[in-house]
Amino acid sequence: MSRRWLVWLLLAVRPAYAAATPFTLFGISESKGAATLSVPMQIIVLLTLGTLLPAAVMCVTPFLRITIVLHFLRQALGTQTMPSNQVLVGLALFLTIVLMRPVAAEMYHRGWEPVAAGAETPEAGFTEAAKPLRHFLIRFAREKDIRLILGLDRQPAPRTPEDLDLAVLIPAYVLSELKAGFQIGAVLFLPFLMIDLVVASVTLSVGMMQLPPVMISAPFKIMLFVLVDGWNLVVGSLMRSFYG
């Protein structure tokens, strides 16, 4: 009898215990309203988004074009690892901050401030914050690349450019920036390539085979770049290409 009463007591207590204790599975806890993420799962999600943030910053900002151009410039000068990658990335990062500061400020005022004040929902705030970014991407994304992404995604062409989805604009912007960066890099290569050709022809004609032509032409390329104030010209042209 005692065992039977114990079984009945457990069956009676189990529903009340289940109602008082939320059910948890893989970090997702079930509350009265809806399923919510537990604190450890929220930390994992935030860390995952944090790892994707550098890639997002690089893809939706002028950082991509600037780093490509600076890399081509270093290759054209033939200085190998000078300036170092840290210096080039730091310069590209601060130039990107200068270019994107107005866009970021507008996104903050239109998206975050109304949500923080309780005037709008997070979904509405995200929609408003995406408008300045969409306008920036439309300025530099080529129509050909946008049509390509729309065709790959099998989406109909929108009525206005402002109706384009960010999932279409971002890859189109990346393709456009890659093309622009490689075009500028090819133009930068031409004068230094001419110096390499002249030095190689002279050393070959005089029979000077002890030193490679690259080592002889490197000081001349660096001297030419310094005399024309190359860093100022390259950075100024890059910045003006985004303001135009």
Image (spheres, rainbow, N blue to C red):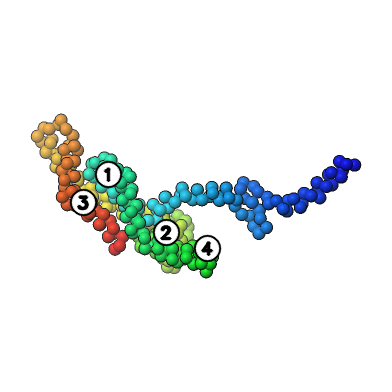
Q: Check disc 1 and report the residue beneath it.
A: 83
Of labels 2 and 3, the one closer to you: 3
Q: Locate residue 242: give its quadrant.
A: bottom left
Q: Give the mark nearer the N terminus: 2 vs 3.
A: 2
Q: Residues within 10 Å of mark 3 (few under 14, many from 20)?
A: some
Q: What kind of residue is marked 1?
A: Pro
Question: Which residue lies under the disc numbered 3?
Answer: 230
Q: Name above or below for residue 74 compared with residue 232.
A: above
Residue 166: x %, y % from top left? 45, 59
Question: Which mark is on residue 169?
Answer: 2
Give me the C-alpha separation between circle 2 and circle 1. Answer: 33 Å
Q: Is residue 142 visible in the rendered structure shown here?
A: no
In whole angstroms, how far apart are the C-alphas of marks 2 and 3?
33 Å
Residue 152 located left or right of residue 87: right
Q: Residue at x 28, y 58 (%)?
A: 239
Name the residue tied to disc 4. Answer: 122
Please state the horizontal and vertical placement of residue 33, each as a whole percent of the image: 66, 59
